[in-house]
Image: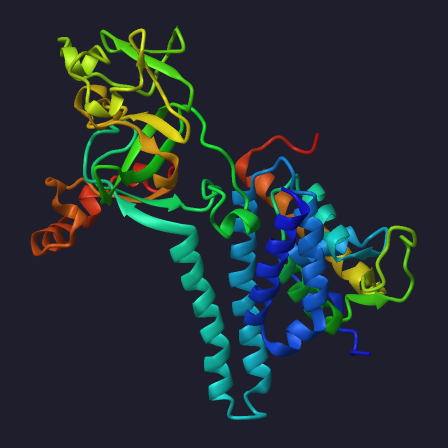
Amino acid sequence: MDSISIRGLCGVYAAMLYAYPRDFRRQYGASMRQVFRDRCREQRGKSWFAFGLLTAADWITSVIRERRAASAATVVQTGSGRKLIQEWAVTLLLFLFVTTTMVQAYVVPTGSMENNILIGDHMLVDKVGFSNTGNNWASYVLPSRQVERGEIIAFRYPVDVSQTFVKRVIGLPGDRIHLQNKQVIRNGQPLDESYAQHVTSYIDDDRDNFPTAAAPAAFAHHVQDGDVVVPPEMLFVMGDNRDNSLDSRYWGFVPRDYIVGKPLMIYWSYDATTPELATWNLAHIEDVALHFFTKTRWRRTLTAP
Amino acid sequence: MPKPAPAATLLPLTPPVFHILLALADEERHGYSIMQDVARQTNDALQIGPGTLYGCLKRMLAAGLVEESDERPDTELDDERRRYYRMTDLGRSVVRAEARRLADAVTAARARLGLAGGK
């Protein structure tokens, strides 16, 4: 984290201070900014995401507390309804900014990542961590890092960008990959994939031995000596439910820019009978209303995928 | 100068207030130094952010538990704008009373739960 990014973060924090009552901000705003800056400087090596959550939680709770204290103190002074609305509007705007730019909620409609991600898992995706593509204002302001092998990512499905898929990163640019009887071999090394599951025992040639002559055209210029070589700025991804996953083997690489983010937390997991829960149709609402408590997978709630 | 309330009426203290007072027990500190010390005291279990810190300090100043200090102990690496806080006598007696109260609570808990007594 260089000093430019810290300055950017401090700018965001300075803006967040406007949510506090004016008197409190005047009295302590400068000190709070200073504390925040000190804290950022000592952050190196530790999780920026945890720091962000902590700061957001601190901000929300203390804004509410100071607001309440201030309105209790000024209620006699003026009928300041308008001021109150003004100040809350700032808080609301910032809240909307965070929920649309930094995290987003998704629901999983397929079982391609079983048994790590199930149909009906509702999860929050961190949209900031991988936003460092260089052509984005956020890359100057927000913490970012590179994708790693074995990580689960959410990304736009290259064949239909309106869909968001969740898979595991198997190959980074330059990696050489092939599958031999279901076993993934990366750069000559067989992978030990404890996260993968196989639901069928027979060998399906295009699925379990890859690449074959029938591999998609996307790989035509990227096969060398029986290995698929991941080109620059691309990723090779697969689902954990290997025998039942529509992944890179069938439609090609994922461009780096198509990454949406990293699944952070499952906030609700609902054992739905149909995959139609991506849209809130009437049958689904009825199903949830009747079976919310019995069909919610409580053990998965608030876990990281 | 607010009228010093008897220590007992201010109890129990919230965890942030208690640990901020402990941080100021042996020296004057500025905001960030308080924050670091609270994290150290609690092995990072309690990490207070700037909003909580200054909200607490505001109320602690009003209650007369702490006061702003004019001296600047860290003269070299210091910044003009930094404000230092020090614990008042009232603050000291309140944090002592709170520590006693917590000790009593722990004793009671040990007796009920059959945990091993103080090693």
**Residue A34: quadrant of the picture:** bottom right
Q: Residue at x 57, y 66 (%)?
A: A15
Q: Residue at x 34, y 40 (%)?
A: A258
Q: Residue furthest left?
A: A283
Q: Residue furthest front?
A: A221
The location of residue A215, given as percent across then percent down, is 19, 18
Q: Residue at x 55, y 61 (%)?
A: A59
The location of residue B50, given as percent across then percent down, is 65, 58
**Residue A249: quadrant of the picture:** top left
Q: Does residue B15 appear in the picture of this structure?
A: no
Q: Nearer the viewer, residue A225 or A141?
A: A225
- Image quarter in which the N terminus of chain A is found: top right
**Residue A191: quadrant of the picture:** top left
- Residue B28 shown left or right of residue A71 in the figure: right
Q: Nearer the viewer, residue A223 or A301?
A: A223
Q: Residue at x 25, y 18 (%)?
A: A197
- Residue B11 shown left or right of residue B92 in the figure: left
The location of residue A133, given as percent across then percent down, is 46, 41
The location of residue A192, given as percent across then percent down, is 37, 12
